[in-house]
Image: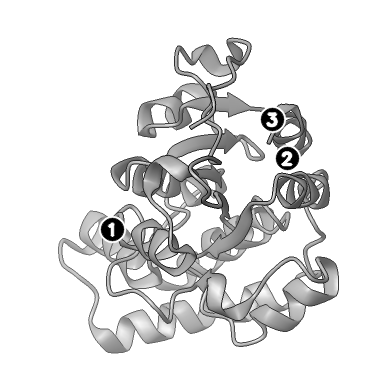
Amino acid sequence: MSAPLQLPPKGESSKQFPLPLGGGREGAVLFDMDGVLFDSMPNHAYAWSHAMTQFGLEMTAYEAYLHEGRTGSGTINILAQRYWGRDATEEEIERIYAAKSEVFNTLPEPKPMPGAIDALNAAKQLGCKIVLVTGSAQTSLLERLEEHYPGCFQEDLMVTGFDVKHGKPHPEPYLMGLQKAGINAEEAIVVENAPLGIESAHKAGIFTIAANTGPLEDYLLKDAGADIVVPGMKEVASLLATMKR
């Protein structure tokens, strides 16, 4: 395998940036979606914080970012335990999540994250496979990705909320991404923005770049296991562009 490329100490990382290429095998870059490919987290945070109040629950927009990547039922039960002292029933979960979705659907469609297309193109220039790993279970996901990122994603290289039993921060989503790409952890790089997603990738043994596109402090992403923390997707694209085949 080629010698790794040493990066500047952005995000206080002492590790080396791996080249996921070598031994005649392709590498892969695994991308999260919300907060990485689309600037959608402000909408999710707004929807969660406003919907919860209808049920006597309180969640700040900031806390919504902390729970990003968790299943809807898991997020609801954290608040149910806090305010009700018990888990929500299935009926309550369904009603609360429907209220969240109703608020979310009234908001403008989120735009592509600045720099995301450049990061995808940099990964393609490296000859890497591009893998999507998201907790989303949107049926229109493929069409939306193809509209904004034509030719970048294949259905057989996508892991969504429909595919896994255990969502982030469990490593299953990223382990499944590696399996679909047919590669090992050391041949991959993950691009994430959320603590739970970073924890998932870290547990799967994959080098992880955190793009801090939200309001969370850098140390929260580092503590979750990020190897490098950068301010956004433009910086991710720059890092990938420095790599050599």
Q: Earlier in the sequence, mark 3 or mark 1?
A: 1
Q: Residue furthest left?
A: 86
- Provide the residue designation for mark 3: 243
- Residue 83 percent coordinates (x, y): 26, 58
- Provide the residue designation for mark 2: 233
Secondary structure under badge 1? helix
- Provide the residue designation for mark 1: 78
Q: Closer to the observer: label 3 or label 1?
A: 3
Q: Closer to the observer: label 3 or label 2?
A: 3
- Residue 177 percent coordinates (x, y): 44, 63
Q: Residue furthest front?
A: 24
Q: Residue at x 81, y 43 (%)?
A: 115
Q: Residue at x 28, y 74 (%)?
A: 165
Tag 3 near tag 2, CB within 8 Å: no
Secondary structure under badge 2? helix
Q: Residue at x 80, y 66 (%)?
A: 149
Q: Closer to the observer: label 2 or label 1?
A: 2
